[in-house]
Image: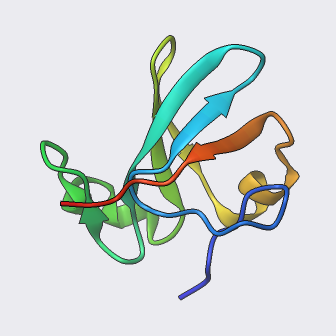
Amino acid sequence: MTTLHYNDGQDVRLGNSIRWGSDATGVVIVMIAEQTALPGHAAAEWAYLQHGCMIEVSTAGLFYYDAEDLTHDANLVLLSRWAGP
């Protein structure tokens, strides 16, 4: 299983709050390889992608990111970590 990283090297984790672009915000809602999802989301729905994560952006909807896309996207920035249930 490959650990996903943001452009700045920090680990991507379920529930992270992110900034997408100049002013949109979002949340990491599914970690695909781990088959984990925030409440209200189904990890199994995205299992066919095998790796990466799904991010829900407030102004644009759902986006899939794989490891390469995450590390190259300087416009996707970690804002805060989710404390979990």
Relative vertical location of residue 43 with respect to residue 29 in this rendering, above or below: below
Using the image, determine if residue 34 lies above or below residue 5. below
Which sits in the foreground, 23 or 64?
23
The C terminus: image quadrant: bottom left
Please state if 59 lies on the left or on the right of 22 as rendered.
Answer: left
Point 87% across, 52% down: residue: 72
Side of 44 where 61 appears, left or right: right
State whether residue 76 is above or below residue 6. Answer: above
Farthest residue to the left: give it. 40
Q: How many marks?
A: 0
Picture coordinates of residue 75, whole percent (x, y)? 81, 33
Residue at the (72%, 41%) spot, across then down: 77
**Relative height, residue 48 to residue 16 (above, below):** below
Q: x%, y% of residue 20? A: 67, 28
Horizontally, residue 63 falls left or right of residue 68, namely: left
Q: How is the image coloured?
A: rainbow
* Percent of width and height locating residue 8: 85, 58
